[in-house]
């Protein structure tokens, strides 16, 4: 993500799935280094009060906006689009990892990403683990971010899976998740 942010120099990073806020603050720190006034818009359905308060108190809070709600709720998606406007955007999807949820996110958020920027889908590695490796979760082999990316890529020709990023990393949780926008149509 650091390389992508430095290369693209986005004005906005949209992040679905904040969890405890670490990645939100990491993204904000990268935007701070860019010095372009950038902002991270984070969406989470169940951000704990403790984490929300910690984010608000952080010195980079000025670069963050937290939206409480489901990343696939049409009203939340509309709010994100309104907040982003026409600014250069990187999208980072890291919420519910089920196939149907990720596919909805891909469908709903991909238009925020313009040529040369990225739509990054986290944790596509789930497809490579043994079946049942994620007990008590609604995702597994055959039902995860990788399968959603595969289906999305069959119908969306705006993106290519950027293998160059993966080749440089060697080890990544998102082997098939670095989607580079190659055209705006």
Image (cartoon, rainbow, N blue to C red):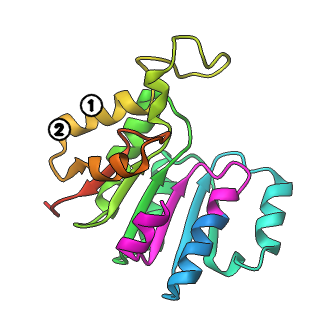
Task: Please state, as top left, top right, bottom left or bottom right, where the C terminus lies in the image.
Answer: bottom left
Q: What is the secondary structure assignment of the residue under circle 1?
A: helix
Q: Is residue 94 magenta?
A: no
Q: Is residue 5 magenta?
A: yes
From this viewpoint, is residue 3 visible? Answer: yes
Question: Which corner quadrant of the image does residue 56 belong to?
Answer: bottom right
Q: Which mark is residue 69?
A: none
Disc 1: which residue: 151
Q: Nearer the viewer, residue 31 or 51?
A: 31
Question: What span is in magenta?
Answer: 1-24
Q: Single out the residue that lies furthest toward the top.
A: 131
Disc 2: which residue: 155
Question: Which corner quadrant of the image does residue 127 belong to?
Answer: top left
Residue contact between numbered discs 2 and 1, judged by CB atoms under 8 Å: yes
Q: What is the secondary structure assignment of the residue under circle 2?
A: helix
Q: Single out the residue that lies furthest toward the right.
A: 50
Question: Which corner quadrant of the image does residue 100 belong to?
Answer: top left
**Rendering coords of residue 145 (x, y %):** 43, 33
Identify the residue at image location x=35%, y=27%: 147
Q: Is residue 52 left or right of residue 105?
A: right
Q: Is residue 19 left or right of residue 130?
A: right
């Amino acid at each position: 993500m650091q390389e992508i942010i430095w290369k693209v120099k986005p004005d906005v990073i949209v992040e679905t799935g904040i969890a405890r806020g670490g990645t939100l603050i990491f993204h904000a720190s990268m935007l701070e280094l860019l010095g372009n006034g950038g902002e991270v818009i984070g969406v989470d359905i169940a951000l704990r009060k403790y984490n929300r308060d910690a984010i608000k108190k952080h010195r980079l809070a000025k670069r963050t906006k937290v939206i409480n709600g489901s990343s696939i709720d049409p009203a939340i998606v509309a709010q994100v689009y309104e907040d982003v406007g026409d600014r250069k955007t990187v999208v980072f999807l890291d919420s519910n990892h089920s196939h149907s949820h990720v596919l909805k996110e891909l469908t709903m958020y991909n238009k925020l990403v313009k040529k040369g920027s990225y739509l990054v889908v986290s944790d596509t590695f789930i497809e490579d683990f043994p079946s049942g490796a994620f007990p008590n979760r609604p995702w597994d082999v055959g039902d995860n971010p990788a399968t959603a990316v595969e289906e999305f890529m069959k119908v969306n020709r705006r993106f290519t899976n950027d293998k160059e990023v993966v080749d440089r990393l060697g080890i990544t949780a998102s082997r098939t998740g670095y989607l580079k926008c190659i055209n705006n149509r």
